[in-house]
Amino acid sequence: MTTADPLQDLPFDELRRRLAEAEETLRAIREGDADALVVRAADEDAVFALAGGDESYRALMEAMDIGAVALDGAQQVLYANAALCHLLGCTTAALQRDGLFAQLDPASAQIARETIVRAGDDRHQTQFVQHHRGASRHLVLTAAPLPLAFGTGCALTFTDVTARIEAAAARESERISRAVLTSANEAVVVCDRHGRVTSANAAAAALARTEPAGLAFEDAFPFGFPIGGAILHPGELLAIAADGNEIKGLEASADYLSPPRDLLVSVAPLRLSGEAIGGSVITLVDMSERKDIEKRQTLLMHELDHRVKNTLAMVISICSRTAAGCQDIDDFRGRFVRRIQALAATHNLLTERAWTGVDLAAVVKAELAPYVASTGPSVDIRAMACLVPPNIGIAFGLVLHELATNAVKYGALSRESGTVTVTGAPAGPRRFAVEWRERGGPAVSPPTRHGFGQTLITRSLKGGDGTGAEIAFDPEGVTCRIVIPTE
Amino acid sequence: MSKPTELTLYVAGQTPKSQAAIRNLERICAENAAQNFVIKVVDLKENPRLAREHNIVAIPTLVRQLPVPIQKIIGDLSDTEKVLVHLQLGSAA
């Protein structure tokens, strides 16, 4: 049985027309003028798209600004976008000819292979540092399965996150710098290249004329500098830093503050990345306290020198006056040592109060302590609390020593039944009266000779205005009335 | 008024070239407004059997039914000159 050829009866021209039409259709399909085809079947005709899905994902990939590549199941490059070629520094042709891994350094290629393996079932992401052309960059590699007509490939994207990471690192660095700046004890000021204060910590703000942020440095910190020094104006500091130089420990004064402050100023250039100078960093050390301490120390040295000289003069005087009234060297040694000990006792009391003054009651107790025993003569000290200056305290101590020495030798302290009463009372403005009263001792008669002791008693505290001492040798006991200047 | 030029554009749903062909045909008609066009757009995705009338295989295809003889051009009609020459639209007036 034969089947009739449907074209057999067509005229030659029609056959030629149909051939031309068929050739045109084939050309159009081959050259991509058509993107769909109608396929005729016995039961139902159907329309099929030609490479439509492929084109859409290629268009999508091209629209991406991150590097993207599609690999087939054998990890051959199906398509790579321009962003990836730019990222890897190669051409599309090279990628398709040599493969993706040939365009990566060995370490990055290994990471890419591992990421693809891990993305066998689901999306997987790896972040790594790639050494590329002498520099490091941070890449995020994302792999996801890619369904293909014949099997499964892999879609890979490469994102360069170097700028983002460096920005985050810069922010963190900035945060740490600010924390350091804030917690620094020293005053730190940062200026931009135009000399404006961009930041100043609390210690620096305390030394500024007003809130410094945003002001020109010389307006916020109008320091004075010693005449003839290397710097005469605050602005010159910044000029030195702008030239890349440093200055350390320059003396300056902030006379606009109350009280004025003495400062040590240092300046250094603020170096940014690439060693570019972006401004200056100024550190300020407040020297006022140290200067005060130095002044106080100098004062104390002078005071000490003065006191030592006074004390030595007093010791020389005591020595010569004691020697004048002594019978022999042993007599001298005894009297002299006891007088120096009396002096030392008052010195001890002054030291306890840092030489600001001495309490008369404490002087009396210290001077009489060697002569008081539980079974011996009694000493009664009344209302003697009175603070006097050091020189008055020293003189009073020596007077007390002479009175006590006399009492031990000839008076109330020479007998167990004897009593000494020392009574204090205010005696008008800036004066204090002390009465030394001896009772219960041997009968007293006035001395026949006026010795150094008596001179010391009557003259030591004599300063005019009713001050000084009077001594009365009553038969029942010695009475000495002393009026002391309290200032 | 001149005899109408009857054109049928066969497309397949929303494929890029079908969409481009519709846009380009609208533009060509607008640029040749003096000509009397009767245009029909057939979406073969909706009814593939309609392809049989003009024996359409590749999509998009533009068919000039009138004036005879029937002329066809395959593609997205982006080359205006080619469309005008091929379908003799300019000379049909």
Image: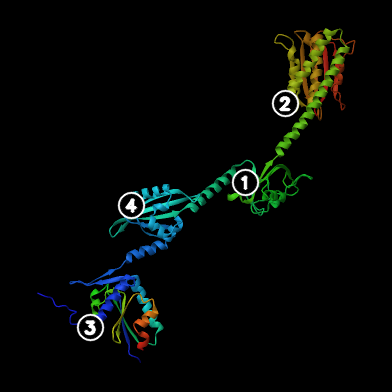
Q: Is residue B67 left or right of residue A485?
A: left
- The amino acid type of the residue labelled 4 equals Asp
- Chain letter of mark 3 equals A
Q: Are marks 1 and 2 on the same chain?
A: yes
**Which residue is tagged 4?**
A122
Label 1 environment density (alpha carbons within 10 Å; few <14, some 14–19, many ≥20):
many
Secondary-structure class at tag 3: helix
**Which residue is tagged 2?**
A353
Q: Are the residues at dot 4 and dot 1 in contact (C-beta closer than 8 Å)?
A: no
**Which residue is tagged 3?**
A12
Task: Give the Cα distance between marks 1 and 2.
Answer: 41 Å
Task: Give the Cα distance between marks 2 and 3.
Answer: 139 Å
Q: Is residue A48 left or right of residue A370?
A: left
Q: Is residue A98 left or right of residue A290?
A: left
Q: Are marks 4 and 1 on the same chain?
A: yes
Secondary-structure class at tag 1: loop
Residue A421 location (% of width, % of height): 77, 16
> Which numbered mark, 2 or 4, is in the foreground of this view?
4
> Which disc, if any, is residue A201?
1
- Work out whether residue B74 or residue A60 is closer to the camera in this orientation and state it: B74
Which numbered disc, 4 or 1, marks the residue that appears first in the sequence?
A: 4
Task: Give the Cα distance between marks 2 and 4.
Answer: 85 Å
**Which quadrant is the C terminus of chain A positioned in?**
top right
Which numbered disc, 2 or 4, marks the residue that appears first in the sequence?
A: 4
Q: Residue at x 51, y 48 (%)?
A: A169
Q: Residue at x 74, y 16 (%)?
A: A380
Q: Are the residues at dot 1 and dot 2 in contact (C-beta closer than 8 Å)?
A: no
